Image: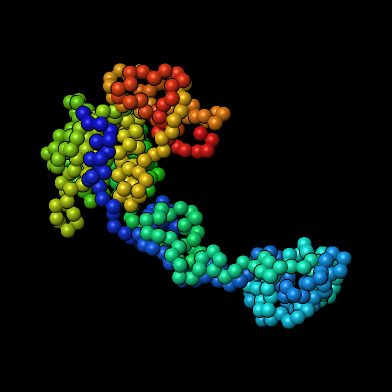
Amino acid sequence: MISVEQALEKVLSYVEVLEEEENPILDCLGQVLAEDVYSGIHVPPLDNAAMDGYAVRTEDTHGANQQSPRFLQVIDTVPAGSISKHTLKPGTAIRIMTGAPVPGGADSVVPFEYTDETQRKEPYDKIGILCKVETGWNIRRAGEDIAKGSLVLSKGTVIRPSEVGVLASLGHSRVKVIRRPVIAILATGDELVDVEQPLPPGKIYNSNTYSVAALVKRYGGIPRLLGIALDSEDSLVAKLNQGQDADMLLTTGGVSAGDYDLVKDVLAKRGEITFWTVQMKPGKPLAFGRIKGSSKAGAARYVPHLGLPGNPVSSMVTFELFVRPAILKMMGKKDLAKPVINAVIEDSIVNKDGRRIFARVIVEKRGGQHFARLTGPQGSGILTSMTLANGLVIIPSDKAKVEVGDIVQVMMLDWSDEA
Ligand code: AMP
Ligand code: MG
């Protein structure tokens, strides 16, 4: 039995960063930039008003105050999106809206609050300025956010909503990113029925395909559902063949020591097994290796294959530990680990079999301290424990027991500020 770290190292050594592709910017959320992005324009393109008010010549406001306004002739109004044809001459002002380009001759914008705007009377040809203003007041300078020619986003940046916005502000509709891995998912088991079907006696619904596919999506991959294979070598091989051109193949079930656990046999016959069984609970039976297939061009090609355990909790937990980092690596990401925090445990946990335990917990923050309590029964068939949990408490293999009040490490599955 190998350790979680050794298993992860093996899995990661079988996957590489994938090729680049060009996508519409909105499709790139969560992907990694494959090119440096420079700006072809100034953002904003022109000096513009930061407030609704009056564009003025600063010197025309000298000596102005509440008691003795300086009156200026209003010669134009300029809304955002338009450019005034006028240039300010001494004694004139242009009414201007936020975002509108500052007219020639103006060197500051006086907000409405510092004018007699509300007392103005028809025919609106004069405005009283009620204070002396400073040069550059309320003017956003051309290029103050992004200067033309500058490096804005570097290769390797993970694209979040703010990066999507910056790309849009530069007028980039598409960008080069590392492509998303295609992860083929096959459930195995004679007892399984798809969610579309009625449930005959003795059968159960196939939930693993859906929880695992949802995890693939959540972490940025593209799930390809191969359906359900029966517990026979022929059925397994036929289904596995449909996943040959994926970047990774996942099966669930059939990796224990039972009569019908054929996944590792097929893996051994059709490729090679790198490891089987990891020192963890849940998730001890976990087969990893590569399956020989052929590329579209007909050349031999090995696809990394992780045989996840069949128990619904085990398949999700082993996914988080081994598949998630592999997906992130293939996508070009550097930070592959989930956040781990310290928390005070509120239940005692006994570790009988010398494996590392990942128990489902609910983490809460109270008085500046994190507390973790078990979700309830920890059987690896109790999938609802995963719906209750926001973290997995990690009990080391050499720790026989943790007591209430001990400080423990928790791998956070869902992180929110409230946790
Ligand atoms: P196995 O490792 O194939 O013996 O499966 C272990 C347990 O997980 C058995 O109780 C299976 O019925 C259950 N199981 C296996 N595959 C699935 C699946 N796709 N959805 C729900 N439960 C499953
Ligand atoms: Mg089975």
Where, by quadrant of the figure, is residue 225 drawn?
A: top left
In this picture the colour scheme is rainbow
* Count of numbered badges drawn on the protein: 0
Horizontally, residue 17 falls left or right of residue 77, namely: left
User: Is residue 203 shown to the viewer in this render?
Assistant: no
Residue drawn at x 49%, y 61% as measured from the top left? 166
Where, by quadrant of the figure, is residue 65 drawn?
A: bottom right
Where, quadrant-wise, is the N terminus in this rendering? top left
Residue 252 position in % (x across, y down): 27, 35
Residue drawn at x 49%, y 63% as measured from the top left? 168
Horizontally, residue 3 falls left or right of residue 30, namely: left
User: Is residue 369 shown to the viewer in this render?
Assistant: yes
Residue 373 position in % (x across, y down): 46, 24
Vertical comparison of 239 with 393: above or below: below
Relative depth, front residue between 249 and 231: 249
Vertical comparison of 305 with 198: above or below: below
Residue drawn at x 36%, y 18% as measured from the top left? 401
